[in-house]
Amino acid sequence: MATDPVALVAIAGTSAQLRGLTNIEGLHLAHHSDTRTGPDRFRVSGYATAAARDEIDARGASVEVLETEEEVAGRLDLAYAGADDDEPVA
């Protein structure tokens, strides 16, 4: 089953803008990535599809792409290179 490509993102906004982020399809937040940046201002990181980034924008929060879809895919390809081989991974 193919999945939509994801980018590594940082999302910033108020508690109201960020409330319910976990319900956005195509957004996977990194555990323990939340940081308070000011009075009622927060920043979280995660992986998001283009559609998820559009939904975040529509909420009024800001989305910064830290790694593009291509960069994430390349990093994952490198990390899992040889994982399908019969050789045990040390």
Image: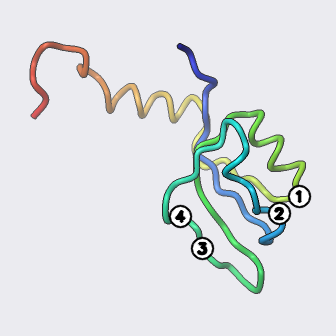
**Disc 3 element:** strand
Q: Amino acid at mark 4?
A: Ser
Q: How is the image coloured?
A: rainbow
Label number found at residue 35? 3
- Work out which quarter of the rendered image holds the C terminus and state it: top left
Label 1, label 3: how many angstroms apart (C-alpha)?
18 Å
Disc 3 residue type? Thr
Tell me the residue at 77%/33% (across/down). 51
Disc 4 target residue: 33
The reply to whether the C-beta atoms of the residues labelled 2 and 1 are less than 8 Å apart is yes
- Side of 83 relative to 69 (left or right): left
Q: Position of residue 30 (x, y in %)?
A: 52, 54
Q: Dots 1 and 3: beta carbons under 8 Å? A: no
Question: Tag 2's secondary structure?
Answer: helix
Q: Residue 83 appears in which quarter of the rendering?
A: top left
Q: Quadrant of residue 34?
A: bottom right
Whether pointer 4 and pointer 3 mark residues with C-beta atoms closer than 8 Å, the reply is yes
Q: Which residue is mark 1?
A: 60
* Residue carrying label 2: 17
**Quick check: 43 above or below 21?**
below
2 vs 1, front mark:
2
Image mark count? 4
In the drawing, does residue 81 fall left or right of residue 71? left
